[in-house]
Amino acid sequence: MEHTSSYEPKSSFAKWWDDRLPVARLMHGQFVDFPTPRNLNYLWTFGGILTFCLAAQIVTGIVLAMHYQPSAHEAFNSVEAIRRDVNYGWMIRNFHAVGASMFFIAVYIHIFRGLYYGSYKAPREVLWIIGVIIFLVMMATAFMGYALPWGQMSFWGVTVITNLFSSLNEIIPGVGTAVVEWLWGGYSVSGTTLNRFFSLHYLLPFVLAGLVILHIWALHVAGQNNPTGLDIKTKADAVPMYPYAVAKDAVGMFAFLLLFAWFVFFLPDYLGHADNYIEANPLVTPPHIVPEWYFLPFYAILRAIPSKLGGVTAMFAAIAVLVFVPWLDTSRVRSAKYRPLYKWFFWLLVISCLGLGYLGAKPPEGAYVIWSRIFTVYYFVHFLLVMPIIGLIETPKPLPKSISASVLPSGGGGAPHGAAAAPETR
Amino acid sequence: MASEVEDPDRRDFLVIAGNAFVAVGAAATLWPFVAQMNPDAGAQALASVEIDLSPVKEGQAITAMWRGKPIIIRNRTPDEIKAAEAVPLADLPDQSARNDLLPESTPATDQNRVKEGKDNWLIMVGICTHLGCIPKGQAMGDTKGDFGGWFCPCHGSHYDTSGRIRKGPAPRNLEVPPYEFVSDTKIKIG
Amino acid sequence: MRLMKNASLATLAFMIGAALASSGQAADGGHAHIERQTWSFGGFTGQYDQAQLQRGFQIYKDSCAFCHGLKRVRFRNLAEPGGPQFPEDAVKALAQSWPNKVTDGPDDQGKMFEREPKPFDPILGPYKNDNEARASQNGALPPDLSLIAKARNVEYTGTWWAHPFSMLRDIATSYQEGGPDYIYALLTGYEEPPADFTLAEGMQYNKAFPGHQIAMPPPIAKDSFIKYQDGSGSMEQNARDIAAFLAWAGDPSLNTRKATGWLVMLYLLVTTLLLYAGKRVIWSKIPH
């Protein structure tokens, strides 16, 4: 993966600067010359899309904070003023609210892409773990952001989720209550809670930005994975990031923006909940409290377990288990493309997650609970049993000799039989 | 193969067109983010206020609010009016009446800064034209400066009984906002 | 390509598996099926019908306003484009003659006083606060109507396996009119309770209302509705017009939003295609 930047300062000032702070040299080396596998498909454009999502959320969020008032009395009114009176306020507010959902759509595709192609395996363990941390911080940020409009769902979502910590009472009596009151800054969710959530909601995106830089750094140390899961061995396996990967990323991003804009302009409220257009009322709980869609799988896991502490533990474990995936997967082959058996289990995991998402929005009763439990069990079985066992017993399909052999007809000469099944990049 | 990799024809029309479209889109997207800082519809709608003048006795002054700015309203005594009318135009640093309803070239006579027949009522935006402080002179006990009008304590600008700058760093006379008498004792500003 | 095939296979497998596994449906808490109406502002091309919004406002003024406020809408909004767009003078006069006054002050004596609303003031209901409203409405609170069309939605009541398809269809056709659909169903949904249904005292039976017991007496009925200026009118027409007006009250930027949306979609589509063509040009220079 060694490569040097081909950056050459064009003016004497650029040269003077380059001798002192070679930032342009660094960027040129990392984002222009950087060797990317030549067989990346469009699923690899989601890294760039996610960077865009974070930047867009920060920009629209800073603008909204210019008009938003983080107090229990004025929060809802100020959001309405943004919708009705602020110039282009409706557009920027829709962009931010829909943007959160788009961010999660992209991150889920990104995560499952990583799981399918084994992007977490050595030497990318740290890259993967930073990704899990990013996911966690993203969820915290989104959760606090959803509190800010101070509608009914905001208020009761905060109440229910912060109350999760009261399950600590089952370990040491009193601790849970103390933690919850510390989170609230009172004896119930109030304007004080809203203020601290606003402060943290403003802070965490910048923490995210820092984590993203580490994530990209780790990626550029190990190099990108690719659909074959093979390492870049020769120069022929890679193309420079600019213009090849960049051109592809741009197409992916604009295609994604089409979906994004469709929701911003034509379905701004589809992904939200109608109850959040009712101002928060601490005396009335809405009939169905549902979190935002991107939390639904975890919410379903929480409710699948018939014990408070157990549910909370399972929910956090569902994320924590991801950290250990690099070591739980015992396969010597990265990409599921060459893993005929594991592939099926991968799709079973996808179905479980989709199923959990659907069930998370349903009332916890009857068949819904049974199916939540089945899917929850599979979720953990997949990581804790399927991954280690299949890796040991499965015979992978023969791998192509190299990345270039998998895409270039004449690339590596006599490609093994398995390579014929390898997909083209397009 | 290396030469093929390193020599893509970047001047291709489609590539240039695509880049141009992205650039135009990015530029157009900037506008809402700039425009959102302008006064919103709520602020624009508050642009006019009505003020009842009946409680203001001769020689008294009140301060009202219009668009978040203090509005100086003084019921001037005949002496003050006479003093203001007697000032030769040549003595004035700023020759313009600074009346929002009159062209800028209107000379800064006292008549041009009040309504005809209502020349006891002097109505101005109470913001020093130097750096935006609020001049003293409204309350009875206030120092009114060397010319009996208003005095800005920030940097020492003196205004006369017609609100015209006479001495100090302020470049212009106090601004007369657009207003009209909707009845004998009621004005509407804005 | 392969991945796509896998994904669609998985979806299919999910559908079939789920259908086979279909077991007892969980009971739904009294949600009635709500018919979807045709709205001028519905879907991705819809815009408000100015005449309908004007009629709708008349119904608000002559019926709803006796109990319900509309505090997030200002009188000035009624004159703005994309809404009923009454002439400015008419709005000014309307504000002045509005029965519910604005509390302002304190005056020079330190007292609060009531004054006639001005165009920049909110359209207030008759009650100063929720407690006063409850006190005079037998404990029931007539909600402010500014956001009612946004704050209500229609629950999906079909079979569970068709739900994903229903969602995809709604996304593709940009269905956002659950609120107005519900309001229409509610206003036309008053009827005699079924024989085995016990109504609490002072409550009405309404087939669209969750739980079917509503405190609001029918504001319009088959034989008692608001007549428009041209003398026409019916209960259904009233319900449709007020629902449209309330949709506007909750989402006054809809017209601009959709018009801008089309420009944005067009731009993005052209740019995506151009970028794709450009990408092919760039990649065509190397074997891949």
Image (cartoon, rainbow, N blue to C red):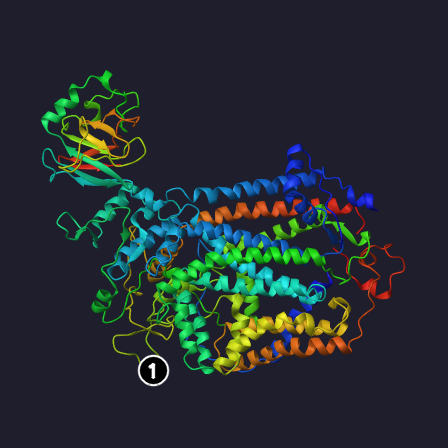
Residue drawn 71% across the image and 45% down it: A243
State left or right for residue A41 relative to residue B134. Answer: right
Residue A150 can be seen in this image: no
Q: Which residue extends farthest right?
A: A414
State left or right for residue B142 relative to residue C92. Answer: left
Q: Name the element at disc 1.
A: loop
For the residue pair A33 and A86, the one nearer the viewer reads as A33
State left or right for residue A361 relative to residue B52. Answer: right
Residue drawn 19% across the image and 23% down it: B110
Q: Residues within 10 Å of mark 1 (few under 14, many from 20)?
A: few
Instruction: Give the residue at mark 1.
Output: C195
Q: Position of residue B105 (x, y in %)?
A: 30, 20
Q: Tell me which amino acid carries mark 1.
A: Ala
For the residue pair C179 and A3, the one nearer the viewer reads as A3
Q: B161 above or below A356?
A: above
Number of labelled discs?
A: 1
Residue drawn 85% across the image and 55% down it: A409
Q: Position of residue A194 (x, y in %)?
A: 39, 62
Q: Which residue extends farthest front?
A: A20
| Quadrant position of residue A8 | top right
For the residue pair A129 and C224, the one nearer the viewer reads as A129
State left or right for residue C143 relative to residue C170. Answer: left
| Quadrant position of residue A316 | bottom right
Residue C117 can be seen in this image: yes
The chain containing the residue under callout 1 comes to: C
Q: Position of residue A57 (x, y in %)?
A: 51, 54
Q: Position of residue A387 (x, y in %)?
A: 70, 75
